[in-house]
Image (spheres, rainbow, N blue to C red):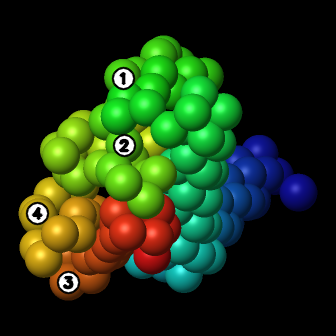
Amino acid sequence: MSAEEKSRSRLLRWLQNLVVITVMALLVMKLLEVGIFNDRWGWQAAEREVVQKRFNENAMLARTEWLRQGKPPQITLQTQREDFQVRMNRQGWPGIDNGCLRLWQMLAGGRLHPRVELQSQQCWFWVATTDAEATLRLVYDARTGQLK
């Protein structure tokens, strides 16, 4: 094999490798786009469940503290991050008079920042998702102490 043929053969192998790497990179990018940006793997649903669970657990902790202290109008809720003064309602749940956004910050925490609205004595939370047309909606009912 002559030097020119060897050179041509190396160039052809190099071009083949470049094509293979480019195709692989495009496939990986497509998988990431489908999986991450369109949430086909359910990450947003999992995050919603975690936030909902944290909110409900902290509401239950506040109720437990309220009962332990003899049902005062206000208790101190100690979370992993900080302590909060929480006004309780007559049923023993964090009251909406704390403000819906403040309730979210105290009980849910986390990195989600919802749009908040008070409707018929309930706090409504809308959390934007990566899908521009979908929004998670959660409702806190202070009569039951549940975020659903």
Disc 2, disc 4: CB below 8 Å? no
- Name the residue carrying label 3: 133
Q: Which mark is residue 88?
A: 2
Left or right: 127, with 97 as reference point: right
- Name the residue carrying label 1: 85
The answer for how far apart the CA atoms under marks 1 and 4 are is: 21 Å
Q: Quadrant of the C terminus?
A: bottom left
Task: Using the rendered image of the protein, determine whether residue 144 is visible from the camera's viewpoint.
Answer: yes
Q: Does residue 147 sit above or below 87 in this rendering?
A: below
Please name the residue shown 36% across and 23% down the image: 85
The answer for how far apart the CA atoms under marks 2 and 4 are is: 19 Å
The answer for how far apart the CA atoms under marks 3 and 1 are is: 36 Å
Please name the residue shown 11% across and 64% down the image: 118
Classed neighbour count for the residue bearing mark 3: other residues with Cα under 10 Å, few (<14), some (14–19), many (≥20)? few
Q: Quadrant of the N terminus?
A: bottom right
- Name the mark nearer the viewer: 3 or 1: 1
The answer for how far apart the CA atoms under marks 4 and 3 are is: 19 Å
Classed neighbour count for the residue bearing mark 4: other residues with Cα under 10 Å, few (<14), some (14–19), many (≥20)? some
- Name the mark nearer the viewer: 2 or 3: 2
Please name the residue shown 37% across and 29% down the image: 74
Kindly indicate the quadrant of the structure image that contains residue 68. top right
Q: At label 4, which amino acid type do we have?
A: Glu
- Name the residue carrying label 4: 117
In percent of width and height, residue 144 lies at 46, 70
Classed neighbour count for the residue bearing mark 1: other residues with Cα under 10 Å, few (<14), some (14–19), many (≥20)? few
- Name the mark nearer the viewer: 4 or 3: 4
